[in-house]
Image (cartoon, grey):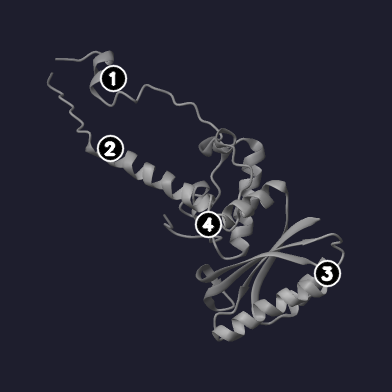
Amino acid sequence: MAASREDVKFLSNPKIGLKHKKYCRFRKFGIKHIDYKDADFLLQFINEQGKLLPRRITGNSLKYQRRVATAVKRARHLGMLPFLADLMK
Amino acid sequence: MRHYEVTFIVDPVLSGDEVKSTAEHIQNDLKGFGATIIAVDEMGLQQLAYQMNKRSSGVYYSIEFGTIAADWLVKFELNLKRNEKLMRFLTVKLDKYGIKYNDDKRNGLIGKRKKDATAAKAEELDAVVAAPAVVDLDA
């Protein structure tokens, strides 16, 4: 029995069709300062190779993306984050 | 008064006393230039993310200080550069949010909240895993 497109959608994960609006977590939660010494926090903004994730994925506003980038660069200088890595997560 | 923060890494090969005296020497240097020391954060021995001068760990210190005139900062950084016991250092100026952040951190307002957030996230993940995904293809 061939299920229609609507049925398939219902039987699989119902969240598939929903679009979640991305948001800037710094604006939403009122975080005004990004600490370059907090490597665990900055880990959310880099990928497995230690590269910065784009705004497209993190949803940061331009202002805070720039600050995240500065903080990550400072953390790299101080040896808290790697310049390059393999499978760091 | 402007607030600055200097973070530096001391060579881990030195003995505990030598590491402490190095940090104290830097504080005295700052005082000599006329700065007021607001807080000293001893972050202790930490693993480095990559090798630095053939060392894989370092002793971290972070000193927040305030000063009215900052024309001596270049000289201060030159002293740090000449100090062979240091592996690396970074001096940054703090804006008003940075000052508030450091204040909150000292009063224990920041670390705690973050722990709660991660715990909540873990619970959320558990809930997602626990919910059985029933997909009946024959229906």
Q: Are marks 1 and 3 on the same chain?
A: no
For mark 1, name the chain: A
Q: Label 4's element?
A: helix
Mark closer to the observer (4, 3): 3
Q: Nearer the viewer, residue A63 or B18?
A: B18
Name the residue that disc number 3 marks. Answer: B34
- Residue at 79 percent across and 67 percent down: it is B35
Cβ–Cβ under 8 Å for marks 2 and 4: no
The image quadrant where one finds the C terminus of chain B is top left
Question: Residue B68: horizontal and vertical position, in percent?
Answer: 85, 59
Residue type at mark 1? Lys
Q: Specify the quadrant of the image occupied by residue A36.
A: bottom right
Q: Which residue is mark 2?
A: B127
Residue B56: percent from the left, percent from the top?
51, 74
Q: CA distance from mark 1 to mark 4?
A: 40 Å
Left or right of B125 on screen, residue B50: right
Nearer-the-camera pick, A9 or A64: A64
Please tell me the numbered disc located at residue A9. Answer: 1
- Residue at position x 79%, y 55% from top? B2
Q: Residues within 10 Å of mark 3 (few under 14, many from 20)?
A: some
Quick one: label 1 or label 4, which is nearer the N terminus? Answer: 1
The residue tagged 4 is: A39
Query: Please, is residue A6 above or below residue A83 in the view?
Result: above
Q: Disc 3 is attached to a residue of which chain?
A: B
Subunit of label 4? A
Cα–Cα gap, marks 1 and 3: 69 Å
Q: Position of residue B54 (x, y in %)?
A: 55, 79
- Picture coordinates of residue A22, whole percent (x, y): 51, 30
What secondary structure is found at the residue carrying circle 3? Answer: loop
What is the distance, in whole Å, between disc 2 and disc 4 at their CAs? 27 Å
Q: Confirm whether circles 2 and 4 share one chain.
A: no
Residue at 50 percent across and 70 percent down: it is B46
